Image (tube, helix red, strand yellow):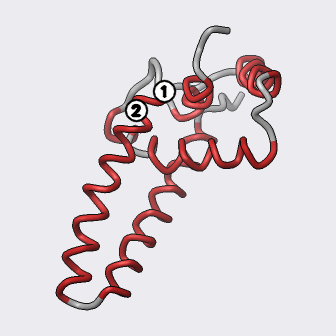
């Protein structure tokens, strides 16, 4: 498979449902690349926390590292700017808390998208 690791992980966040065999082939490919354990968890976290934007993009072809970079840029703009403004007008702790709450909610949405890609028969 000549795809990047993030492209393989990104398939689970697409607006598409895959059968069990295809998902198992993705899992096997990631395992053969040594993407297991803590490393896998970190990559899934990075993907889920940035690819949640796919609820607005509705991409169903390919999500990869480029989309992850765009997602993180959008996260910073959408959460960072309001957090800075709130921090400036209220206080620093409220600004940081705002950023973290928004980040946790959207990461939860991202992980929800991941599980939605598995075709239920």
- The quadrant in which residue 68 appears is top left
User: How many numbered marks are there?
Assistant: 2
Give the residue number, with chain letter if any, for mark 1.
64
- The quadrant in which residue 44 appears is top right
Residue that protrudes farthest toward the bottom in the picture: 90
Relative to 121, 50 lies left or right: left
Residue plotted at (36% across, 76% down): 98
Residue that protrudes farthest toward the top in the picture: 2
Contact, mark 1 vs mark 2 (Cβ under 8 Å): yes
Q: Position of residue 22 (x, y in %)?
A: 71, 18
Residue 43's label in the rendered image is none
- The quadrant in which residue 32 appears is top right
Label 1: which secondary element:
loop
Q: Position of residue 74 (x, y in %)?
A: 30, 48
Residue plotted at (23% across, 80% down): 86
The N terminus sits in image quarter: top right
The C terminus sits in image quarter: top right
Q: Position of residue 113 (x, y in %)?
A: 53, 42
Label 2: which secondary element:
helix
Please say if 121 is above or below 77.
above
Give the residue number, with chain letter if any, for mark 2.
67
């Amino acid at each position: 498979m000549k795809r990047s690791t993030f492209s393989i992980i990104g398939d689970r966040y697409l607006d598409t449902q895959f059968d069990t065999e295809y998902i198992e082939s993705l899992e096997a490919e990631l395992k053969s690349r040594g993407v297991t354990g803590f490393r896998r968890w970190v990559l899934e976290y990075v993907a889920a926390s940035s690819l949640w934007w796919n609820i607005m993009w509705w991409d169903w072809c390919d999500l990869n590292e480029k989309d992850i970079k765009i997602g993180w840029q959008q996260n910073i703009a959408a959460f960072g700017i309001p957090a800075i403004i709130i921090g400036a007008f209220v206080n620093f702790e409220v600004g940081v808390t705002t950023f973290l709450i928004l980040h946790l909610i959207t990461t939860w949405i991202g992980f929800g998208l991941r599980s939605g890609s598995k075709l239920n028969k």
